[in-house]
Amino acid sequence: MSVSVRIDDRIALITIDNPPVNVTSHAVREGLMAALDEAGAADVGRVILTGAGKTFVAGADAREFSAPPREPHLPDIVARIERFPVPVIAAINGAALGGGLELALACRWRIAAPAATLGLPEVTLGVVPGAGGTQRLPRLTGLPAALSLISEGRIVAAAEALRLGVIDAVDADPVAAARALALTDRPATGDLPAPAAADAAIEAAHRQAAKRMPGQTAPLEAIELVAAAARLPLAEGLALERQTFLNLKTSDQAAALRHVFFAERAAAGRGREGGADIRSAVVVGGGTMGSSIAYALAGIGIDVALVETDAAAVERARANVTKLYDDAVRRGKSTPEAAAADREARFTFHAGYDALPAADIAIEAAFEDLDVKRRIFSALDPALPETAVLATNTSYLDVNRIAEGIRNPGRFLGLHFFSPAHVMKLLEVVKARETAPETLATALRLAARLKKIPVLAGVCDGFIGNRILTRYRQTTDILLIEGATPWQIDAAMRGFGMAMGPYEVQDLSGLDIAYANRKRLGWKTKKDFRYIPIADRVVEETGRLGRKTGAGWYDHAEGQASPSALVGRIVEEESARAGIARRSFTDEEIVDRAVTAMIEEGFRILEEGIAEKASDIDLVLVHGYAFPRWRGGPMHHAGRIGLAEIERRLAAFAAADPLSWSVPSLLRRAVEEGRDPDGL
Ligand code: NAD
């Protein structure tokens, strides 16, 4: 039974019970209508609406997102609650999100438990509230608060909800409080006067949306709807809201955001079964990555032994770790005392491997050099129990070769964290040739504890993400030599929705990393490969390594980046040297080429079994490389464009530049069979 009614003392208690989080599935909506019928037929003076378990109602049923709406619709239930002959009181025992909060808003009173959370996060899925939220909430809170809650999809705790006027009271036992409540003659939420107009708040909401969710439609529509609450009678506002909701529900952006949401849920579910629990760890290398990996591990209660090469390096590592704790204190996430105590309790620092504790896992984050890494594991192997999981954080190198020669190679794998490792959610879990299933399960379990989004990857140069990144950059370098400029390419890719363009990113992270990588791959002399010398010349001849040297693809002065005449000249010289007549490119041409290159590489990654499914590639690009979430990742985006069109584009690119492009056979097959990327 997903909805139950209990009547005593002239009170009808309606309980929504749809584990795990009481979503408003079709059965719940039918159950609510039946429960209201029953309460209406009984001689009651009030109705209390609550949820079973720890949640009030967490929103709509994700499984119904893509299906046509089925009666009874939530707005009908909400309208019935609002006009019910006796007052309905929401006893909000836990999270009231989306449709859950909309049910509560239609109630005459709202009493929430202290731990309850409340919000209308619909915009994060590319839609707007569809059951009156945009019209009722501003009548309770005024425009400014409703704007920030709805257009940002912000979720607040009960105390803040009380302050904003979303709820009437906070009580440890909201059902008892609802029973005891002295009823007064109070208007329905929808009958409250329209909120005052607030132009400044609307402008501020637009600025926030442009900053936090650029390119997305739903936040803008949400702002319009909330603003309309000040202008339109309730019925008209509700009709406008419903129409907007239904339009957005079938939009490309909503489909993309749902796709990423489901992919994240599937990934997060991976660490729930099997594997051993990690209690202690060795981290080798205390630089950028090692220190933040160690900090993340300590943050979930794992004891960390941090290994560096010598005493001076140990001191640098210690300072790196201390800085992370200090940052947490500065951001108000910890106190100086708690931070110091935690660091003391969790960390030991070591120069070399002599006094290492017996750890459950070792994660190596030393220099990106095969020999360095191999030497580290040959030292770790005898220093730790034979059962300890051994992991490398390499970005590109061959994990199988790093593992050669260790005892029990089934315990070896890659754990590719992203920088900063204590913040970034993505984790590529790289399965080496001999990695045992139990080792993978342990790694996934650790990922779940760290609240990461783990994606399984096979061994190849750069795994999923960096392999696509390399291809993307190679493709934009070809655009450079054919006539585009770095600044134009950056602007075009930002226009597509990438957080930054490829050259801006290199200036931020340093041109030396990609340079070392190209050298390692031997691009200069590689056969059957279109080598573009521009980036190498910038590094070798000018020493411009990006922001850290004050110059890279751009000139950097006082925090401002401006196009570099010197780089512009190198680009033009290389075009001339290659005998290429430079031509102009539209932004659309730039984006089509760059994104199609990512898609082609994605198909190859799938074809070779490096990724298990297309949505994993999307997760990697969205979470690790700032691919616009609202485009769903490159593979989802390919599906929206149409795979036949992608095949056509690739064939055309390949005809003009056969060294750089070809049509993957997996794509050909998918087009023949009429399948989309998720079906592969
Ligand atoms: P880094 O230069 O900041 O740190 C490397 C650290 O390793 C230094 O502190 C160095 O003293 C130490 N080290 C070197 N050799 C050692 C040895 N034999 N024993 C113990 N310690 C040793 O580099 P980083 O950016 O932290 O990168 C580390 C690894 O992580 C590399 O393999 C890199 O490819 C990978 N990675 C980096 C990023 C990133 O964004 N920086 C992201 C993912 C993966």
Image (spheres, helix red, strand yellow):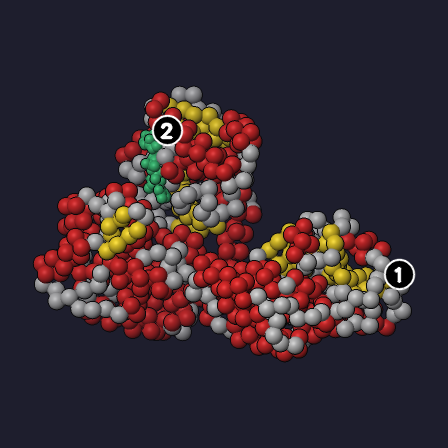
How many labels sit on residues?
A: 2
**Image quarter of the N terminus:** bottom right
Identity of the residue drawn at 27% across and 34% down: 371
Nearer the observer, 671 or 33: 33
Measuring from the top left, give residue 307's x and y in whole percent: 39, 28
Disc with the residue nearer the chain's start (1 vs 2): 1
Can you give x and y, in whole percent of width and height, for residue 185 in the image?
82, 66
Which numbered tag is attached to residue 316?
2
Tag 1 residue: 8
Q: Is 65 situated left or right of 598 in this image?
A: right
98 versus 354 height, above or below = below
Alpha carbon separation for disc pair 1 and 2 = 68 Å
Quarter of the figure with residue 491: bottom left
Res 245 → quadrant:
bottom right
Quadrant in which ligand 1 is drawn: top left
Task: Tell me if I can see residue 49 in this picture.
Answer: no
Instruction: Tell me if residue 17 comes above or below residue 446 in the rendering.
Output: below
Which residue is drawn at the image coordinates 84% and 62% (left, top)? 183
Residue 518: give x, y in percent of width and height.
22, 48
Quarter of the image for residue 243 reads: bottom right
Q: Is residue 393 visible?
A: yes
Q: Is residue 585 above or below residue 369?
A: below
Q: Which mark is residue 287?
A: none
What is the x, y in percent for residue 331? Answer: 51, 41
Secondary structure of the residue carrying numbered label 1? strand
Taking the image as shown, residue 520 lies to the left or right of residue 677, namely left
Under mark 1, the amino acid is: Asp
Cβ of mark 2 under 8 A from ligand 1: yes
How packed is label 1: few (under 14 Cα within 10 Å), some, or many (20 or more)? few
Residue drawn at x 28%, y 37% is 369
Between marks 1 and 2 in the image, the one whose residue lies nearer the viewer: 2
Crowd tier of the residue under label 2, counting other residues whose Cα lies within 10 Å: few below 14, some 14–19, many 20 or above = some
